[in-house]
Image: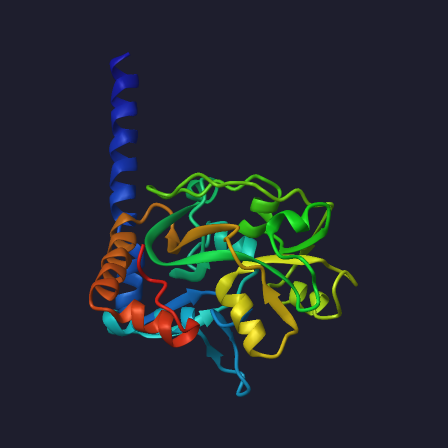
């Protein structure tokens, strides 16, 4: 029994030393390389997208560059699919995720939330010729959402946001059919074909909808109420508390000195940084 206890104690000590050695490994890696790899999207304007020069631009890109600047390192971008970005187990491929991720209870099991950096209201979007004037007018209709996102969770009545102080989600829409899309702009491409041609409505971030309207899409937002309002977080690999705290502290600084307010206003025409 004593020998067994000795082995258990030794194993526990070894595990503790291993975890201690791993703690802060991301910060050490980033600072030693003087470079940070950000996982984000490449087709989600105005959050993040490729411009005419094939350069990454957008709100999330500016936030990433500001984080890197405050760390004193260079930044590069990788664009994994959404499930990979939010699924954790990055194995050092990315140092941080800046992709307008909603903190849900399911995601909290596989990734860490470094901090809320802005808030996004989700809206109902219809073709400009639609007669829908309120949410109830969309009951029984064909609704389009980007797959793997909170808009899909919402329309399926499965949304569980993991953030304190938020009011409970209200479900007022009963869709006739749900159609999912692999990219945030694909449902807009279907909706622009005409009212009811392929879709009757979309649920999307207000910022994305406003950007589509700005770029000439023949769509409009159903006025009166949001579908829901969500906080967006910068994410980090699970289990590296020092790195997660470091990024969180930088986000708090950027919020306090007005940087995030300026960046949301730059890209969205409105300050979305405040609770």
Location of the N terminus (image quadrant)? top left
Q: Which residue is depicted at the point 54% across and 62% down? A: 80
The answer to whether 118 appears left or right of 53 in the picture is left
Q: Which residue is depicted at the point 50% across and 53% down? A: 226
Residue, far right: 197
The answer to whether 31 appears left or right of 45 in the picture is left
Q: Nearer the viewer, residue 150 or 82?
A: 150
Instruction: Give x and y (percent) for residue 144.
Output: 67, 56
Compared with 247, 138 (above or below) is above
**Residue 33 seen from this side:** no
**Residue 114 seen from this side:** yes
Instruction: Give x and y (percent) for residue 149.
Output: 55, 52
Q: Which of 110 and 274 is in front in this view?
A: 274
Q: Quadrant of residue 274?
A: bottom left
Instruction: Give x and y (percent) for residue 35.
Output: 33, 72
* Render colour scheme: rainbow
Q: In which quarter of the image is residue 91?
A: bottom left
The answer to whether 53 appears left or right of 28 in the picture is right
The answer to whether 67 appears left or right of 231 in the picture is left
Instruction: Give x and y (percent) for residue 4.
Output: 30, 18
Residue, far bottom: 53
Q: Which of 268 and 76 is in front in this view?
A: 268
Q: Quadrant of residue 62?
A: bottom left
Q: Total number of numbered labels?
A: 0
Residue, far top: 1
Location of the C terminus (image quadrant)? bottom left
């Amino acid at each position: 029994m004593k020998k067994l206890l000795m082995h258990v104690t030794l194993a526990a000590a070894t595990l503790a030393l291993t975890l201690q050695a791993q703690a802060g490994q991301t910060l050490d890696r980033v600072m030693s390389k003087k470079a940070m790899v950000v996982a984000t999207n490449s087709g989600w304007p105005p959050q993040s997208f490729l411009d005419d020069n094939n350069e990454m631009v957008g709100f999330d890109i500016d936030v990433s560059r500001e984080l890197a600047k405050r760390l004193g390192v260079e930044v590069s971008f990788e664009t994994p699919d959404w499930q990979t970005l939010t699924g954790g187990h990055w194995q050092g491929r990315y140092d941080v995720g800046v992709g307008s991720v909603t903190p849900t209870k399911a995601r909290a099991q596989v990734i860490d939330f470094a901090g809320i950096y802005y808030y996004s209201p989700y809206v109902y979007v219809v073709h400009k010729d639609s007669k829908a004037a309120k949410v109830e007018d969309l009951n029984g209709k064909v609704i389009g959402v980007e797959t793997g996102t909170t808009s899909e969770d919402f329309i399926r009545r499965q949304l569980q946001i993991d953030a304190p102080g938020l009011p409970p989600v209200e479900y007022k829409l009963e869709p006739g059919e749900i159609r999912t899309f692999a990219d945030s702009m694909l449902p807009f491409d279907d909706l622009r074909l005409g009212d009811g041609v392929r879709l009757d409505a979309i649920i999307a971030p207000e910022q994305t909808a406003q950007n589509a309207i700005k770029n000439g899409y023949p769509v409009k937002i159903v006025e009166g109420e949001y579908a829901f309002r969500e906080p967006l977080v910068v994410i980090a690999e699970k289990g590296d508390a020092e790195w997660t705290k470091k990024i969180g502290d930088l986000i708090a600084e950027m919020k306090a000195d007005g940087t995030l307010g300026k960046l949301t206003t730059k890209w969205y025409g409105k300050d979305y940084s405040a609770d």
